[in-house]
């Protein structure tokens, strides 16, 4: 009986094989990054233009955030207007603190 001949395997360390796997992935990642940056900058420029011409932003959430003011007397209101905020810290006594 003849022994089975081992199959020839492709080496994983050939430069051409590694490059055919990694180059498309790097190119795809760079294209995706360029698209995201371009879309972000385009949106920002468009929003600045609309805000300068109409006084309103494109994003409705931004409008809501600007419209909502904290009620007077709350901590958020005091912090926003630079007023003093009093903080009461309470502690619990232990063996060394029997006062």
Image (cartoon, rainbow, N blue to C red):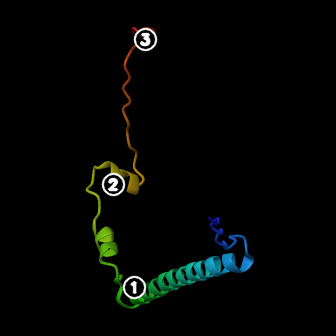
Residue 79: % across, % down: 39, 52
Q: Earlier in the sequence, mark 2 or mark 1?
A: 1
Residue beneath disc 1: 51
Q: Quadrant of residue 10?
A: bottom right
What's the distance in space between the residues labelled 2 and 1, CA to CA? 26 Å
Query: What's the CA distance linking mark 3 and mark 2?
Result: 37 Å
Q: Which sits in the foreground, 43 or 18?
A: 18
Q: Which of marks 3 and 2 is nearer the N terminus?
A: 2
Structural distance between the alpha carbons of marks 3 and 1: 60 Å
| Residue 35 image label | none
Which dot, 3 or 2, sits closer to the camera?
3
Residue 77 in the image: x percent, y percent?
A: 33, 54
Query: Quick one: label 3, few (<14), some, or many (20+) residues within 10 Å?
Result: few
Foreground: disc 2 or disc 1: 1
Category of crowding for the residue at label 2, using alpha-carbon neighbours closer than 10 angstroms: few (below 14), some (14–19), many (at least 20): some
Q: SS of the residue at dot 3? A: loop
Q: Specify which label sits upstream in the sequence, 3 or 1.
A: 1
The residue wearing badge 2 is 77
Q: Position of residue 90 (x, y in %)?
A: 36, 26
Disc 2 is placed on an element classified as helix
């Amino acid at each position: 009986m003849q022994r089975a001949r081992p199959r020839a395997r492709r080496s994983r360390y050939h430069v051409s094989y590694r490059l055919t796997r990694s180059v498309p992935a790097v190119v795809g990642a760079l294209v995706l990054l360029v698209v995201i940056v371009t879309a972000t900058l385009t949106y920002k420029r468009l929003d600045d233009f609309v805000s300068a011409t109409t006084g309103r932003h494109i994003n409705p959430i931004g409008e809501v955030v600007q419209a909502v003011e904290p009620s007077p007397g709350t901590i958020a209101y005091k912090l926003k207007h630079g007023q003093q905020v009093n903080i009461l810290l309470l502690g619990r006594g232990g063996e060394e603190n029997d006062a």
